[in-house]
Amino acid sequence: MSIQFRASISRLVTNYLRRLGMLEPSPEDLPGLWFDHKCPTIRQLVSIELYKKTLSEHIDGDGKNNYMGCFLYRIDHYKCSQAVEQEFLVLQFTHWDNPTATAAICIDRSVNLTIGQSSGMLTPSSASSEYLATDMIEPIGCASNLNINSCLTKKFKSFRHIASLSFLSQSTRPSALQVAVLLFQVNQHTINYHALGGQCDWFGHTVFKSLQTLFGQEGEKEVFESDTRGRFGPIPVFKPSLDDVNAICDGFWNAHQQTMKVVEARRSLRLEEYNKLVEQGRADWQQTRADWQHEIDERDRQIDERACQLAKMQAELELLKAQRAVPNDTAESPSPSS
């Protein structure tokens, strides 16, 4: 086999395996869930809408959506100790394959005061649908206490722990994909920021209670400072209501079913692409085998041709030897006249 032919075979196999995603091992991380990282030095924020889209459309090299195998096992509710006393959540997830790996994300709601009214102050009397809420997710990295505290300190400076909820039963824990669907449901339920009802306090409380209602019946809830939720100092800024939670929970499974249709569509598309690659690979391999056989046949023909040439040359050599031997014999024989 020639060097050029071996090189062509190597390139063919390498390109084929790379197109199938079989050369590199499965990554330890997923977009938005970093299991093998510490708190990032550069903050990476993503909207809840984009987060849900990313999780629902993600298909790994083996045709699976690994977000469906990452499960929420703990949610923590925090409150900033300074300024407007922003409330936020930290969610911790298990790895789809590694039982010791975990990842955490931080979620909070804010408002962009540059969009809407000309006034820079958001007061109870001016809070209306003119301000869109900004619900963002920020990956923290591995869900160790040290890493979480380090990341939250960089982002919020000073904060305190309000409450937590642990999902004890592995069979009822929500997947990361289900959590993304729920977060989007909460976002769409109240897309506008209200100083007395649609702010970070409402968002954190609604997400917390919705997860508890849907998946945390057997969970363990621990409250550290329950009287501080939904308050700005001593002043209550919203009254917790189960109406929003019930409405979100009632529509969750239908929304989840619609999301699963997206997942299946992406999976079918990936399978179709995979089958096309397999067929193309099979066709390429058959063509390569045909080229290989052609090269072998050509080499055999050349060998046979050289063998014929060698045999012909050998025959000519023997004939030449015979012709040279005849005159010598004639010269040595006596003349008849003598």
Image (spheres, grey):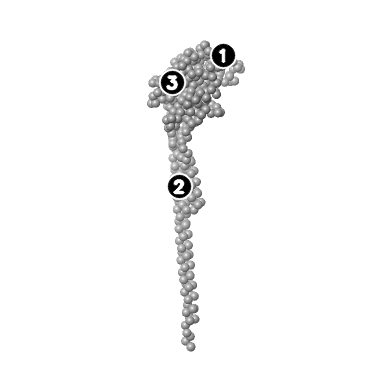
Single out the residue that lies furthest toward the front: 146
Q: Amino acid at mark 3?
A: Leu
Which tag, 2 or 1, sits closer to the chain's start? Answer: 1
Q: Position of residue 151 (x, y in %)?
A: 52, 25
What label does residue 123 carry, if any?
A: 1
Q: Nearer the viewer, residue 3 or 64?
A: 3
Q: Nearer the viewer, residue 8 or 102?
A: 102
Cα distance, mark 2 to mark 3?
Answer: 55 Å
Q: Which residue is drawn at the image coordinates 45% and 44% (left, top)?
A: 281
Nearest-to-viewer mark from 2 and 3? 3
Q: Position of residue 227 (x, y in %)?
A: 47, 13
Residue topped by disc 2: 285
Residue 113, quarter of the rendered image: top right
Q: Which residue is drawn at the image coordinates 39% and 24% (left, top)?
A: 169
Quick check: can you spot residue 175? no
Cα distance, mark 2 to mark 1?
Answer: 70 Å
